[in-house]
Image: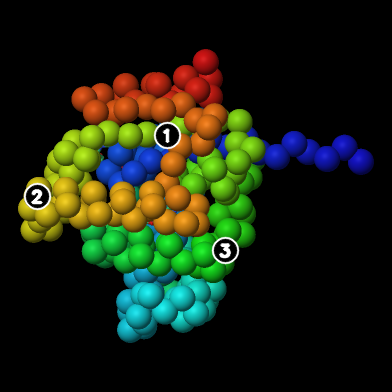
């Protein structure tokens, strides 16, 4: 019996604030493909672990939490931000903070937590295709992906973007603290032993510093449809 080829995957990896989430969503919309925001999974586990009062360095407890946390994505009306439902609670706004990002980064360095999330990430790979956003999409989760991109931008540029993003949500943040939080998270994500943040050898590197969103989208789309 002829087996169907696996659905195509475009992986978009990169550090915090490089624009992965925004670019992935716009490219997935353009292609009509599914979208995996793998960072949201780690943020959801970090959030659930915090809500349960767990010590985020307690690998066993946090792994059990990763195995039992129920995470659902729900399209928002009028094309708004996809809602992330964690154990039945819409946690979307809490998950977008740098505090949630730091918690996610902390638990993401635990190998058994990463293992607990692999099957869920692989399950997103369905026809007609998948755009997968994260840190290790092109290196670990979808190494056979035919299309791979690694987005970067200077830490200052990424802090500026995150500052504008969070201010628009009405959060009180300072540019200086955001930049140091982003740099600390980058260091942890890139220096951990398991699935470190790094471009896949066959990924197209795109430095988005000074590039508009539309230009980045066009460059990434050209990888899939030259
Ligand atoms: N090329 C760009 N120029 C200016 N702003 C951008 C660009 N790309 C993304 N942004 C904006 O920067 C902010 C952060 O982008 P986004 O959340 O997509 O980054 P990210 O890499 O997914 O971050 P994280 O990994 O922390 O979730 C958003 O408000 C987004 O609209
Ligand atoms: N594939 C992934 C995605 C995310 N993480 C960790 C490391 C990040 O700092 C944190 C939050 O991710 P974001 O929402 O900012 O993309 O989660 C990871 O280790 N692997």
- Quick one: 118 or 225, which is closer to the camera? 118
- Quick one: 156 or 171, which is closer to the camera? 156
User: In terms of sequence position, does the residue under pointer 2 or pointer 1 come before the other?
Assistant: 1
| Residue designated by label 2 | 176
Res 150 label? 1
Disc 1 to disc 3, C-alpha distance: 23 Å
Q: Position of residue 218 (x, y in %)?
A: 39, 21
- Quick one: 37 or 50, which is closer to the camera? 50
Q: Taking the image as drawn, is residue 135 in sight?
A: yes
Q: Quadrant of residue 220?
A: top left
Disc 3 to disc 2, C-alpha distance: 34 Å
Q: Taking the image as drawn, is residue 75 in sight?
A: no
Residue 178, placed above or below residue 28: below
Res 91 label? none
Mark 3 closeness class: few <14, some 14–19, many ≥20 residues within 10 Å: few
Dot 1: element: strand
| Residue designated by label 3 | 115
């Amino acid at each position: 019996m002829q087996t169907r080829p696996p659905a195509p995957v475009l992986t978009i990896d990169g550090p915090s604030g490089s624009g992965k989430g925004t670019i992935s969503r716009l490219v997935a919309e353009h292609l009509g493909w599914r979208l995996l925001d793998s960072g949201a999974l780690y943020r959801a586990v970090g959030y659930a672990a915090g809500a349960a009062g767990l010590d985020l360095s307690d690998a066993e407890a946090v792994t059990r939490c990763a195995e039992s946390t129920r995470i659902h994505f729900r399209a928002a009306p009028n094309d708004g931000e996809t809602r992330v439902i964690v154990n039945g609670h819409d946690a979307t706004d809490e998950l977008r903070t740098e505090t949630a990002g730091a918690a996610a980064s902390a638990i993401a360095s635990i190998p058994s937590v990463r293992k607990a999330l692999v099957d869920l990430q692989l399950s997103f790979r369905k026809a007609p295709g998948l755009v997968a956003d994260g840190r290790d999409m092109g290196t670990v989760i979808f190494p056979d992906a035919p299309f791979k991109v690694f987005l970067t931008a200077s830490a200052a540029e990424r802090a500026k973007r995150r500052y504008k993003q969070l201010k628009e949500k009405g959060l009180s943040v300072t540019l200086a603290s955001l930049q140091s939080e982003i740099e600390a998270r980058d260091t942890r994500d890139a220096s951990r032993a398991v699935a470190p943040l790094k471009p896949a050898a066959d990924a197209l590197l795109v430095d988005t510093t000074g590039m508009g969103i539309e230009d980045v989208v066009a460059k990434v789309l050209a990888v899939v449809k030259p």
